[in-house]
Amino acid sequence: MTAEKSRHRILEAPLVPALLGFGLPLALGMGLQVTFNLVDAYLVSRLESGAVGASLGALGICDQLAALGSIISFGYTTAAANSMSHLQGRGDSLGARRIAWQSTLVVCLLGVVFAFLGLVGSDFVMTQVIGVQGQVRTLGVQYLRVIVTGNVTIFLLLHLTSLQRALGSSKTPVLLLAFSNLINLILAVLLVFGPGPCPLFFAWGPPIAAALHVPRMGLLGAAWATLLARLVVLFPLGFIVVRRFGFFRPDTRGPFNFSTERSLWQLAWPSSTQLVVRITAMLAIQSLVARAYTTSADQSATTALGVVFRLETMALFIGLGWGSATQTFVGQNLGASNQTRAKKSAWVAMWFNTIMMGLLSLTYFTYGPSIVRFFDSEPSVVAISQLYLRTVGPSYVGLGIGIVLGAALQAAGRPRLTLLLDLLVLGGVLLPQTLLVTLCRGTLSSLFLAISSAYLAFAVVYVFAYQKARFRAQLND
């Protein structure tokens, strides 16, 4: 689709089918991104029985920690994409592509910073901050060091696909993510199992691993597979953004522009902080569970959370997909001074996302135990996971409403408001309740109810705030 056709669809075509056609591929594409984690979890769950529980527990914690870097970078990416969508809506394509160059410089710089942190800080974070014990700590440190050091690959993957989306392209990123998942599966089979035993379906892997002298790396192999798969897909992605979308051409490049970067940072820091607050809240729950509901001999609760948080990430990323679509429609329509269509776009996207969240939560409620057994069949892990999915799963609808309407407010230049709303829910509802339950030695069921109530609170505060918000053609806060 040409740039002019994309612009027409976003600014003038009938809103409901236009938003469905644009947003559904993004939601599915973001869901595909989650399969990186699910593939890793499945393969790791097929290791020898003595290594499965600790590996899954470490994987769940490390994914949350590694996501901290991704969401800081993604906050900057969101600011750049919103600015580009406004410029594209005004017809300033050259200005939009200059934003792409300047923002990519910062994303690469963030990659360097997190590479250093991954190399020197992984052991401290797992041991002193999260407080995990035994084999979970040992495996977690190894995994975290690799995945955080290579975080620049996911930074750039999310950044470049988001900038494409800001210009009106939603299908190309999906195809690239599908390709990256295929590469990840192949590499993970080779690196996790090596020449050793593996599930019958992957029997093709050990002979290839033996021929290539690839060792059996277990959980560490999953980290390297994810990193290499992301690196491989960056090459065609870079080619596409340069040749098709005109990124990084001589007339768009230039030295580091402090004025532009300052403007982007003013939009980015509330978004990044908001995402950090969210992930920190979930890490706090991981830490509470690790300290209050596990022992060195029984880590079932940590393992269960490692599984269900991966499944919950599917809900989060589907919401982010519809949120990304919302940002493009809101941003370009505000750039074109069509405030009515901009505001209506978010309500339409919210309902599409609500339907998908409802179907996902129904799936987890009905088939949760079978899905969990796919990763870990330990009865205690399955029981805790089932309790979580049936207690928290229905509240994913509320979480999704908050994500989509929050994305719309960010696109309208109100990132500080979304940060304030998140602090209100997480600091006023989630953390106090979970801490109280833990201190009073409450049950896991009570803890999960506290999480569910916070997710529903997201819907309440964001619907109220969005109804009261006034959209303007210019970005402001």
Image: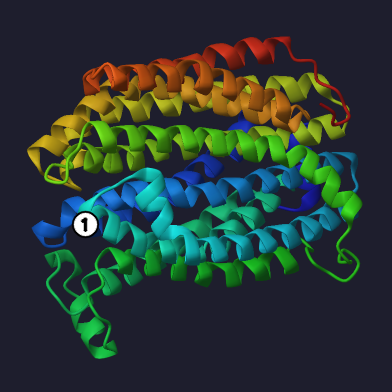
**Residue at position x 63%, y 37% in the image:** 273
Name the residue located 81 percent from the left edge and 48 percent from the top edge.
Answer: 4
Residue 188 appears anywhere in the view: yes
Amino acid at the residue labelled 1: Gln
At a point 25% along the width and 49% down the height, the residue shown is: 133
Q: Is residue 204 above or below residue 270?
A: below
| Residue 278 appears left or right of 323 | left
Circle 1 packing at 10 Å, graded few (<14), some (14-19), many (20+), is: some
Q: Which secondary structure, mark 1?
A: helix
Q: Where in the figure is residue 423, as x and y percent of width and height?
A: 58, 23
* Quarter the C terminus occupies: top right
Colour scheme of this structure image? rainbow
In the depicted view, which residue is nearer to us: 253 or 337? 253
Q: Position of residue 154 (x, y in %)?
A: 54, 58
The quarter of the displayed image where residue 325 is located: top right
Left or right of 466, for residue 140: left
Residue 102 left/right relative to 131: right
- Height in image: 119 above or below 403? below
Say which of 399 and 265 sits in front: 265
Residue 444 placement (x, y as % from top left): 23, 23
**Residue 348 on image: x %, y %:** 61, 22
| 254 sits to left or right of 340 | right
Residue closest to the far front: 128
Q: How many marks?
A: 1
Against 165, residue 472 (above or below) is: above
**Residue 85 visible in the current orientation:** no
Rendered image quadrant of residue 381? top left
Q: Quadrant of residue 471?
A: top right
Name the residue nearer the viewer: 410 or 19.
410
Residue behind mark 1: 135
